[in-house]
Structures are given as structure tokens and as C-alpha cells.
Image (cartoon, coloured by chain):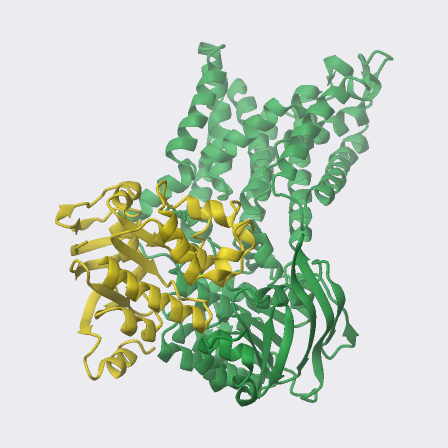
Amino acid sequence: MATRLTRPNLLSRQGRWGTATLALVLAALAGLGQVLGSYDTGLFTTAFLFAIAATSLDLVWGFVGAPDLGHAMWFGIGALTVGAMTAVTDRTGLVISVHDAPWRYAVAVPLGMAIAAALAGLVAKFSFSAKGSPFYIAIVTLALSTVVTTLYSQFPRITGGDNGLFGFAISGVPARTWYYLTLAALALVVTGALILVRSDAGLLLRAVRDNGSRARYLGANVERVKIVTFMLGAALAAFAGGLYGLMAGLVSADLFSFLFATEMLVWVSVGGRGTIIGPVLGAIGLHLAGARLSEDFPTQWALIEGLLFVVVVVFLPDGVLPTASAWLSRLVRRATPIAGLVTRSERRLTAHTGGRPDLPTGTPVVTCSGVHFGYRSLLVLRGVELRVERGELLCIVGPNGAGKTTLLSVLADGGLPITGEIHFDLGSGGHGRRAPHRLARAGVSRKFQAPHLFGTLSVAETLLLARANGRLPSLWRRSRSVAVGPSVLDVVEATGLAGRDNDLGGTLAHGLKQGLELAAAVASRPQVLLLDEPTAGLTTAEREVIGSVLRRLVGAGMTVVLIEHDLDFVYQVADRVAVLHEGRIIEQGTPAEVANSTVVRQAYLGAVVP
Amino acid sequence: MRVEVTSLESGYGSATVLRGTDIRVDDGAALAVVGRNGMGKTTLLRTILGYLRPSAGTVALDGVDVTGWLPERVVRRGVGYGPQDEAVFADLSVADNLAASSHRTDPRRRAEVLDHFPTIGQRLRQRAGTLSGGEQKMLTLCRVLLGGPRLLILDEITDGLQPSVVDTVVRVLRWERHERGTTLLLVEQNIDVSLAVCDRVAVLKRGQLIAETPVDAPTVRSDLFGLLSP
């Protein structure tokens, strides 16, 4: 019951402000390059490379929520690849000469990026799993960074051992050229990253971060999104490391160390995690301040930096930049720019319901036979036999604790271990159970009983993602609006969501979250809609609207399975009712037939049945 | 316990949800607050309980100004609160959840409450997180009742309950009122429950009270239906 909601990520939402800030900073830095002395030029050049590393960490930590505690490794790999390609060492690891053929330098940077990406992919593959804890990645990367620094000294022929490799810098490039080269590289990386996180695909990243398990049911392959982003982050860090190698000609175990990785974490969190620009400013600012202050306070700087980190975490948990931009926007009193509006699509109804009018109704879509399932020793489903037919609205009723929600779960999540058989026929050849995202893509969508959507995605953004239903949204385009069918709009209006297009999921009232759950499930245009208490928290009048929307969807060929306690509502909408009691379907038939069932009378009318 | 809410303004950050709400529930009376989604019902309850600090207005219980008090201090005056969701301690057993309500539960009362909700009585050793959604609601209500509150604040407590259990809830709440003199403040979407348990219904719209009616007014149902339509 958190009362504190994450502040909307202002910079990635308020596009123009961010872009203006960025352009201004870059222009100022470009001008500065003309007047800086040689010492400062070098300082800034390093700062730009660190800023690239900070950006890459922000993609991983800020956008898919994977705290990489060993991000320095990837930077180190980039630098080491350049060193190992060019420096020649003796047996003890002492550099005796340098191969300075240009092709070696040219190959080393992309090679380092590829090695980092491959290793990161391996780490990610083992750390991100559907059942794994989100902390795995933190523990694994922390352990790895310790292992890698130890290993570093074990292979002196390649790494230079305890002394590291040195003197392999590319020769003949003036410091000022490096300044502009690295600035250009930073501009390129930051622009690319901003385009990515503000694109429609950026919504996918945030959805995965906010609520990965829910994103699966909208067709997102959560593991793949995390793995690919993690690899991208590692490759970008190795890119920065490679440039550092070319420029400084220096690599040692320090570049891989947990200490350096921690510094990156500080840049990102002080600047503002999840804002891209914040970490850039954090890295540049702290690196410059560190260089200046460590001259005057050589021993105290680490302490000052640590204290600064604590102060930021305690007083500005979102980081400096989001806090500053929140103040700014409060001063300017500007309305949030449009991040997406829900509009009525001009296409025909059927194109938006996802039902398959081309397939004959009355054929089975889902068939359960002998389904048993339990949580450890607690057996919930005890042999469910159920056939759901195409184009029908089936209501599942039953007492609390009968296993209704569990039944929907085993239908939608092929990862739950059941005994018995569940078969789907969604028009493209029959198949068995599948992982949630694959089933969602095949056309089965689910509304949960307790609403858990995405805290930092607006209503319109959530619907945009639901509509994509697993297809990768554009990596660069940013939709200004999302067109949805009339059914979705009806749900939006009936549940009170109208006019709240830009409200963030985390700030919605409970009932509105329920409405958004339902709207998102319908917006994904499924063939089969699994609804757990779709009318919870709605008034009688609102229920009637939802009922007629569902009837219309069924009329257009959709199949609906819904769990409901409101019998008036059930009688109003259902074609067929199945009664689940103690983990078995004990009765099914038309609403009128089932109304006389003993269990229904016991559960619904309160009659005492022995 | 008498509840007086005067010109209450409250919300989340810069978003104001309650805009000058006035509510009064007399000692032993029962008020149902209804309204469409997002109109401020839960915000009202949470502000009364001290989870949210109001930007203006006052909350008084039995004439004592409790505005801005922390929830634990408000609750200690004899207020029982059943929130809308995530209301059970998922990793504790059902029995431990019940024990968490009060350190001085009268065993007779415990038996009485569990008698109303046999499902809960049968599952005392089960981990509360493995209960179904409806069972968690029952557990929430049982836990709140065990505290023996003088003011009972319940947010959508019948949501997701099977009809016969809803009937039980109605019976229990009526008994609480008439036998123990408990004051009730409910946010309840189920009109039948509101009308059966309470004596007044208040309609909240955009953070303001737009109508208040006794439950025995002849046109109460159609009035409410009209006020709560999309």
C-alpha cells in the first residue's frame, strides 16, 4: 500500500524539454573545446567516454530494471581488447612493443563490443528467467566483477597482469581531435538511446521494468527484451572502453573493478535513473568535480562522493535531473505534452475485435480434460473437464476458493505444472499449452482479478502496448495517438477512464485500474478473452454497458470466458454457465438450467445443503 | 464513534482528488459512500485514516481533531479498516493474520467471528497468500472485526465474494451495528449491501459530495442508478 508513487519520468515524457537541454549542453561543450587547456581537454574527453558508459548502464538499469553491479566489466573488455590486439608483452606481462598497424585498432573496437555483447548475453541468459528472482542479475554481476578482477592477474601475457597494459594509444591524434571525436560519439549514443526509449518500443522496456510478469500476458517476451537490452548496454560500454583504450592506451584490472562499477551506479542514480540525459550529466559532472576536488582533498573525495550519493538517495530518490525538471515544469505551468491519445479507429469492427468470423462457431477453442493442479500440497483443481466453443460467452461461477482464478491461470500460463490435457484450437492448427506471451500472440488475452498494470505507462501507452500484442513496436517512431476499436472505447467510457489518456497507471484509482485491465485485454484483439471479474468495482449502470460490449464482441466471433459472482450479470450475458466447485466442473448448461443446481443454490442463495 | 469530516481537501502530489468534502456519521449510524471510479472514495477513507495528509479541512472522531495523525494512532482510538486490496499478510498463516489484529482478542469473539466465516476457520494453518481473492477479503473482514472496533471503515469489502457470503457480511455488519453500536463507514459498490446495512447513502463525484439520501427514500434505487451511470 505505497502512498508514494513514482514521479512520471519527465524527461523521457517531456520530449522537447529534454531535447532542448541536450542540444544546449552539446553546443556549449562544442564551444568549450576551443578554449580549454590541454589538461582540461583530456579530462573532458575521459568524462565523455564515462558518460557513454553511464548511458549504457541507464538503459539496462533504468529502463529494464536490471541492476548491473558489474557494468565496469564491459567497459574493461572494450579497453582490454584494444590492448591485447596491439601491445606485445613478455612472459611476465611487461609491454615490450606495440603493433601499431591501423587495422588492429580498427578491428579492436568492434571486436571488443562483440565479445562484451556475447558474454553479456550468456550472463543474461542464465540470470533472467521467468521463475528467477529479479535480484539474480545483481548477485551474478557482483560476483562476476570480483571473479574477473582476480582472473585479470592470472593471464599476464594477454592482460599485462598486475601492471596492466600501457603505451598502446593510437599515435599522432591531437588531444583536441579526441575531444571532438568522443563528444561526437557521446552525442550519437545519447541521441540513439533517447530515440529508442521514447519510441513505441521504449514503452515495452518500461512495461518490462514496471511489471514483467504482467507484460507477458500482453505478448511480450520479457526475457528476450531483457537479454537484448542487457547485451546492447554491454556493447555500448565496451564501445566507450574501446575508445578509452585507443585514446589513453592504458588498461588494468581497475577498469573491470567493482569500485569503478559502483562509480557508474553513482553517476546514474545521482543524475537520474531512467532519464538518459541525467546519467550523462551525472558522469560528466562527478568526473570533473572528482578530478578538481581530489587535487585539493586527495583523501576526502571518495568520502564526499559517497556522502553525495547518500544525500541524493535519501532526499532526491529520483535523482537530480528529474527533481529539477519537475520544479521547472511546475514553474512554467505547462501541461504535460501529449504522449498518446485514445482515438476511435476508422477500421471496421471485426478488424478490431480479433474474433475470427471466418471460422465456424460452435467448434471447440479450448478443451480441458482431467486437469489437476495444486500449489504444493494444496490441490486446487481436481480433474477439470471443460470445452469452450468458438463464439460463445461462458461464465464460470462457483464459491470462493473453488479454483476459478487458478483455472484461468493454468489456461493462460503453460509453465504451470498440471496433469491432464489442455488443447487450444485457434485456427492455425491445434496446439497444447504455451508460455503466456506465446499464447497471447496466438490470440488468448487475460484480465486479472487484482489489477496490476504498469506504473509509469499512461492509459494510452498501455493500450498502445496491448494493441501491439507482442509485435515489436517501432524502435524509433513515437506514436502520438493510439487508435482503438469502438469496443475498447466503450470500455474506456463505461469504466470512467475517458479523458484520462495521459494519467499514469500507478496513479489510477483501484476501479480505474480494473477498467484499464479490461480495456487492455480487449484492445489486444484476441480470439479468446479470459476475464476474471470484469465488473468488479463497477456500478450497476456501468455493468450493463460492459455486458453489452461483451455481447457485441461475442457477436463478432470472439470467445469469452469470464468469472463472475453477480448472477444478474451472468444471466444477462452468458450463453452457457459452468459451475466450478472444489476443483471440478460439477454442472454446466444454460443460465436457467444451472440456476437450479444445488451448489449454485448453496453458494448463491445461501440455502443450507448437507 | 462520531465521524465529522469538514471541507476536506486531499490527493496525491499535485493531483487533488478531494475538493472540499463534508461527511458526518453519527455515533452508531452507518453511511455508505458510493460513486464512479476515480471520484475519490478510497482517497476519502485513506485521508480519514491518516494514510494521506489533507491539504485543507479537518477530520474529527468523537469531537477529537485527528487531522494529520498517523494511521496507527487513529486506529488505536478504536477504528477498524478493511482496505480494498492487498490487505492480508501474504506470508503469514491465516491464524497469524487473525492474531495480528489485536493483542487482546476475546476467544469468544474469535469463535463468533469464525463461526460466520467457516471457510476461514478451516484454513487457519494455510499461508494467507495462497487463499483465493474472495477468501482474502473474508480474512480481511474477520481480522478487522476481531479488533472490536467502534468505527468500522470498509473499502469494497464484498467485491469478489460469492452471494451467500455477501449475505453473511450483511448479517454480520447489521449485528455489529445493532448489538455493539459500531459506527459504519463503507465504500460499497453493491447497492443492495449499502441499502441493507446503512441508513444513509452519500454520492461522491469529482471529490465532492453531490447527494446524500436516506436508504428508505422511495426513489433511492432509481436516483442512485441515474447518478452512477456512465
Nearer to the camera, B85 or A42: B85
* Depicted A341 relative to depicted A163: above or below: below
Q: Is residue A407 left or right of residue B27?
A: right
Query: Can the viewer see residue A312 in this picture?
Result: yes
Q: Is residue A31 left or right of residue A560?
A: left
Residue at left offset 67%, top offset 53%: A377
Nearer to the camera, A563 or A467: A563
Task: Give the colour chain B carries in the figure.
Answer: yellow
Q: Residue furthest right?
A: A91
Location of residue A551 in the rendering, given as x and y in whole percent from the top left corner = 51, 85
* Depicted A214 relative to depicted A326: above or below: below
Residue at left offset 44%, top offset 72%: B164
Q: Quadrant of residue A591?
A: bottom right
Q: Is residue A276 left or right of residue B14?
A: right
Residue at left offset 66%, top offset 43%: A230
Nearer to the camera, B18 or B61: B61
Task: Give the colour chain A carries in the figure.
Answer: green
